[in-house]
Image: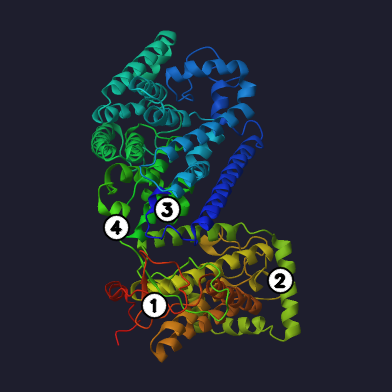
């Protein structure tokens, strides 16, 4: 909330102050409801899982046969990864393990998450608006509930939330430097990398807190050494502060520099030396940045930077220990108002979605995908140029210019009047992030769409019968005709496999470069059409002609198929072959044709644009991958996508040369009252004027 607060929008978006206050209260209640629903869902998911499959780490530690329950060293099996002091604290739970592994532990962890969200919301850099102060807490709690570290900690029964909460308590909640150091020292006794916060409090002038941190850590570690001398020696000396405990250090879950180097093939003494060198450099640079932002009044950002450095410098940083990356969302980045969303969106996506949804499943991307959270932590700790509160752009970024609204024929259009047409080019990184994540979600939902072979084949017979009754059942004739013409069969097969993604991406790229205003309109309509297509896959699973037994269709692309277990290359395992209605192959090609016809300046460009949907519909029918009615369904969802875009945001804006632009700052949200002339911004208009598709 604080990050996007000063994005250039008028603070009175919804009209009068009374209306704004009422809507703000409604939004606050709604966000608290969302946070409560997410908390209940997380608890239900954990507790509804059979025993033995949930809270597995906690069961390993304090269960009837856990390492803290039996005699001998707690590190004999390397299953316990905590410090000796952590084992000393957890040992009493072995007497009530059954209760601790159920409602009590899960509910207690959720309470810790809520407390963490409340403290983080109160620690936002000041000053903040009333809107931010009211909405920050439920937003923070909701993001924490959605984050992979919290979900992982709840599922495994881990204690990783406690050190983070103790550090925030020590820096933002308790009074007195000694009490602050006591909290941080206790966190370090449970997770030694938290000692990195001692230099932070020292260099920010809280020297008593730093000394208290060191003293508390030393005293608690000495206490554990006295109570568990053999285990303490095993942890601090034999395992060098826990190195080698838990899973394999080169596992994907270890998002530290040590794990990344091992995954890259570096091992032995060279790996150890390189790890120590890199981790020291990261810690030093991050500490310098953290002290700077703490002095600037952004202590929460300084804490997040220090925590991200601790992730990188730790020998092992498992997924449930990566909450510091999410806290880095409070930093503000970007000169333009539209750029303010890039960093928070990227952080939220990295911490809430699996890495395979963020990057394509390509071997060349594996080094990035396997270390994505580490890269985000390194970026936050060392590289991202967070704005200083004293910088003019911190509170007043370069505003976004908007096109004047185009009157609609329907009085209630647009349904979302605050959804305005920006004239500036959207941020490329943000667009790429959203496109990638949306496509990954689309692929996942498409592959998991409901229905099986029997249902899909039954629907196939329905569609086939309907086409025969309508006299449009031409698929069999076209398929066999093309199969007998090798050159045409090869061309249409190649066209089917190659141009489905290439042409839409090319159209979007050209629009982004040459027509940024129209890019937003076109991208939104394509997204809505795809969303409607997913609904079709769920509601009506349909077997394509090539997978219909007894009808004699020929799979001209992949050859003869075993209909019970079809094989169509590398996409077999990730694609739902019964997601045929509607045909987004044809739908996306039709979208390309409509956009080109609407925007291309030359008639021959428009004609070429129409060839793509023509070739696509020929290919999907000739290769027996779709029915004719699938193409009709694809056309319907594309029409609905354009229609919804029109209803929600109004007609497509004219070129800014034909209609004046409305600068964002100090302007009232549209619709502009009749008779009012919007203020002209010639500089902004000339800077953001969309160029035609050709140079003529």
Residue 405 in the image: state x and y as whole percent. Answer: 45, 75
Q: Dot 3 corresponds to which residue?
A: 345
The mark found on residue 335 in the picture is: 4
Q: How many marks?
A: 4
The answer to which of marks 2 and 3 sits earlier in the sequence is: 3
Closer to viewer: mark 2 or mark 3: 3
Q: Dot 1 corresponds to which residue?
A: 677
Q: Residues within 10 Å of mark 2 (few under 14, many from 20)?
A: many
Considering depth in this image, is 243 or 607 the residue closer to the camera?
A: 607
The answer to which of marks 4 and 3 sits earlier in the sequence is: 4
How far apart marks 1 and 3 lie (CA) works out to: 36 Å
The answer to which of marks 2 and 1 sits earlier in the sequence is: 2
Q: Residues within 10 Å of mark 1 (few under 14, many from 20)?
A: few
Q: Residue at x 49, y 25 (%)?
A: 79
Considering depth in this image, is 302 or 593 the residue closer to the camera?
A: 302
Q: Dot 2 corresponds to which residue?
A: 460
The answer to which of marks 4 and 2 sits earlier in the sequence is: 4
Q: Is residue 240 left or right of residue 322?
A: left
The answer to which of marks 1 and 4 sits earlier in the sequence is: 4
């Amino acid at each position: 909330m604080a990050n996007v607060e000063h994005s250039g929008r008028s603070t009175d978006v919804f009209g009068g102050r009374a209306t704004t206050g009422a809507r703000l209260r409604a939004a606050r209640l709604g966000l608290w409801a969302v946070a409560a629903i997410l908390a209940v869902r997380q608890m239900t998911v954990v507790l509804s899982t059979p025993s033995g499959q949930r809270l597995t780490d906690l069961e390993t530690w304090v269960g009837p046969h856990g390492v803290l329950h039996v005699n001998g060293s707690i590190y004999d099996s390397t299953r316990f990864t905590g410090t000796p002091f952590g084992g000393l604290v957890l040992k009493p739970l072995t007497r009530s393990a059954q209760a601790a592994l159920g409602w009590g532990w899960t509910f207690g962890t959720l309470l810790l998450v809520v407390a963490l969200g409340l403290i983080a919301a109160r620690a936002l850099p000041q000053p903040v608006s009333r809107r931010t102060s009211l909405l920050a807490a439920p937003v923070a709690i909701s993001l924490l509930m959605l984050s992979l570290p919290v979900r992982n900690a709840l599922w495994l029964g881990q204690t990783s939330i406690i050190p983070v909460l103790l550090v925030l308590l020590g820096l933002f909640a308790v009074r007195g430097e000694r009490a602050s150091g006591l909290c941080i020292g206790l966190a370090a006794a449970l997770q030694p990398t938290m000692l990195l916060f001692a230099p932070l409090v020292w260099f920010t002038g809280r020297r008593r807190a730093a000394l208290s941190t060191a003293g508390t850590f030393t005293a608690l570690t000495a206490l554990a050494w006295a109570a568990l001398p053999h285990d303490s020696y095993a942890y601090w000396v034999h395992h060098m502060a826990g190195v080698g405990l838990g899973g394999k250090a080169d596992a994907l879950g270890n998002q530290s520099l040590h794990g990344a180097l091992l995954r890259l093939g570096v091992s032995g003494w060279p790996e150890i030396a390189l790890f120590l060198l890199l981790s020291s450099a990261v810690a030093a640079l991050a500490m310098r940045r953290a002290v700077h932002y703490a002095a600037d009044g952004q202590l929460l950002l300084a804490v997040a930077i220090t925590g991200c450095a601790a992730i990188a410098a730790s020998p092992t940083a498992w997924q449930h220990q990566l909450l510091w990356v999410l806290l880095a969302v409070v930093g503000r980045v970007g000169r333009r108002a539209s750029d303010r969303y890039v960093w928070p969106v990227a952080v939220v996506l990295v911490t809430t979605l699996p890495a395979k949804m963020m990057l394509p499943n390509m071997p060349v991307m594996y080094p990035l995908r396997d270390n994505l959270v580490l890269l985000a932590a390194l970026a936050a700790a060392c590289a991202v140029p967070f704005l200083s509160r004293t910088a003019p752009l911190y509170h007043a970024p370069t505003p976004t210019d908007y096109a004047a609204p185009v009157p609609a024929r329907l009085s209630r259009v647009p349904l979302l009047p605050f959804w305005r047409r920006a004239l500036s080019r959207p941020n490329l990184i943000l667009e790429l992030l959203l496109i990638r994540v949306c496509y990954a979600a689309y692929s996942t939902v498409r592959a998991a769409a409901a229905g099986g072979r029997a249902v899909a084949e039954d629907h196939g017979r329905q569609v086939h019968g309907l086409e025969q009754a309508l006299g449009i059942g031409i698929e069999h004739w076209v398929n066999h005709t093309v199969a007998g013409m090798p050159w045409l069969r090869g061309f249409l097969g190649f066209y089917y496999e190659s141009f489905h993604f290439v042409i839409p991406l090319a159209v979007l790229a050209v629009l982004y470069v040459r027509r940024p205003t129209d890019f937003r309109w076109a991208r939104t309509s394509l997204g809505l059409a795809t969303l409607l297509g997913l609904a079709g896959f769920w509601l009506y699973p349909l077997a394509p002609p090539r997978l219909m037994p007894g009808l004699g269709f020929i799979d001209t692309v992949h050859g003869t198929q075993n209909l019970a277990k079809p094989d169509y290359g590398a996409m077999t395992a990730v694609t739902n072959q019964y997601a045929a209605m509607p045909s987004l192959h044809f739908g996306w090609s039709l979208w390309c044709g409509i956009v080109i016809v609407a925007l291309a300046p030359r008639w021959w460009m428009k004609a070429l644009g129409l060839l793509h949907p023509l070739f696509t519909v020929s290919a999907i029918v000739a290769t027996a991958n779709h029915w004719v009615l699938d193409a009709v369904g694809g056309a319907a969802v594309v029409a609905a996508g354009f229609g919804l875009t029109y209803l929600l945001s109004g007609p497509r804006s004219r070129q800014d040369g034909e209609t004046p632009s409305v600068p964002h700052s100090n302007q009232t949200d549209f619709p502009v009252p009749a008779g009012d002339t919007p203020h002209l911004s010639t500089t902004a208009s000339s800077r953001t004027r969309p160029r035609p598709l050709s140079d003529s």
